Image (tube, rainbow, N blue to C red):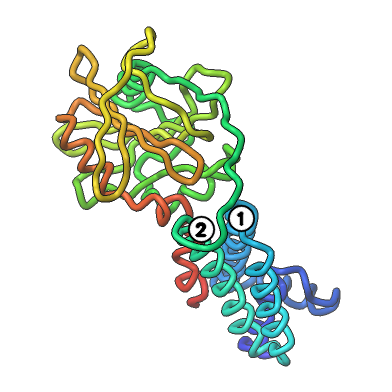
Amino acid sequence: MTEQEFRNLLPLYADGELAPEQRRAVEAHLASSPRDRAAVDRWRALRRATRRVVENQPMPPALRGRVAGVLATHRRAAGSPARSRWTLAAAAAILLAAAGVWQFTRPHGGPAQPAPAPAAVTLVAAQDFGAIYKLCGVGSHDTESCSGHCPKEVHDRIAQAHGFRVLLPDLSDSGYALRGVCPCFGRHDLRVVHASYQKPDGAVVSVFSIDQTVSLRRDARGSNCDHERTGRRDYELAVLDDKVAVVKWDAHRQSFAFCSEIPANDLRVLADSVDVARTIDYSAFAMLAFLGY
């Protein structure tokens, strides 16, 4: 086979759909082609992103049926390996787009859904975030070996290692570089991933991803925090006695928090600059980049 014929088979190889003889031929080719090995990795990342959307974004049966029909049509249209790469990519894109549109538009239309049963609210004291900020943020704790990396480079690895969606924003436009990631929090009823960022002038910001929604309290006694509504989201805010500020918000059935000694309003503005939907699933929104050779 020619080099181009091998490349046409890469999506099918990544999906495990090749016959044994073809699979062995592709594997022999990949052994001497780092470029095509990277292409296979991109296809597998796209497949993982599609699976995450399907698993995490509920869709009504009618929409799911329409998407399934589109997928079937595109699979039948992939009459040759040369076309399969693009038809499978289109099908994945349609699935991602349909799930995303449903997720972000369903509160504004369609039939009313039964209200979910109220769940017990998990309370977290702002001082708990402040303690990890001091210990692991300022202290630069990096159990996940992320220091010096672009957040996009390590995001999928961290999310997969901890089993839930993790916020690792790119804060470079604000002058912050990722300095460390650790799972330290000290609560057995929560899974929390902590990422620390630092500016050249020494300012540190901690970013927390929590596997469920929590309610922020000012202290261990349960005192309520301040609330602030912006154009993007609702925040709970607290400033501790040592001037450490915490801002927390909810998205995608999880909670996220920023913590720092910079002024509370500046911290809220920094948090407001982060697009959670894009950041927690880099691979879904960057899938066209995965398709380039």
Residue farthest along the right direction in this orientation:
20
**For the residue carrying disc 1, how many other residues have a C-alpha within 10 Å: few (<14), some (14-19), or many (20+)?**
few
Residue farthest along the top direction in this orientation:
221
Q: Is residue 161 left or right of residue 147?
A: right
**Could you say whether the residue bearing mark 2 is in a helix, strand or loop?**
helix
**293, 211: nearer the viewer:** 211
**Could you say whether the residue bearing mark 1 is in a helix, strand or loop?**
loop
Q: Are marks 1 and 2 in contact (CB under 8 Å)?
A: yes
**113, 138: nearer the viewer:** 113
Residue type (three-letter) at the residue carrying disc 2: Gln
Residue position for label 1? 58
Quote the CA–CA distance across marks 1 and 2.
7 Å
Q: Locate the N terminus and report the quarter of the image it occupies.
A: bottom right
Residue located 64% across and 61% down the image: 60
Tell me where residue 166 appears, x and y as whole percent: 47, 42
Residue position for label 2? 103
Tell me where residue 46 appears, x and y as whole percent: 57, 65
**69, 78: nearer the viewer:** 69
Q: Considering only vertical position in the picture, is 289 above or below 164?
A: below
**Quarter-wise, where is residue 65 in the image?**
bottom right
**Quarter-wise, where is residue 269 in the image?**
top left
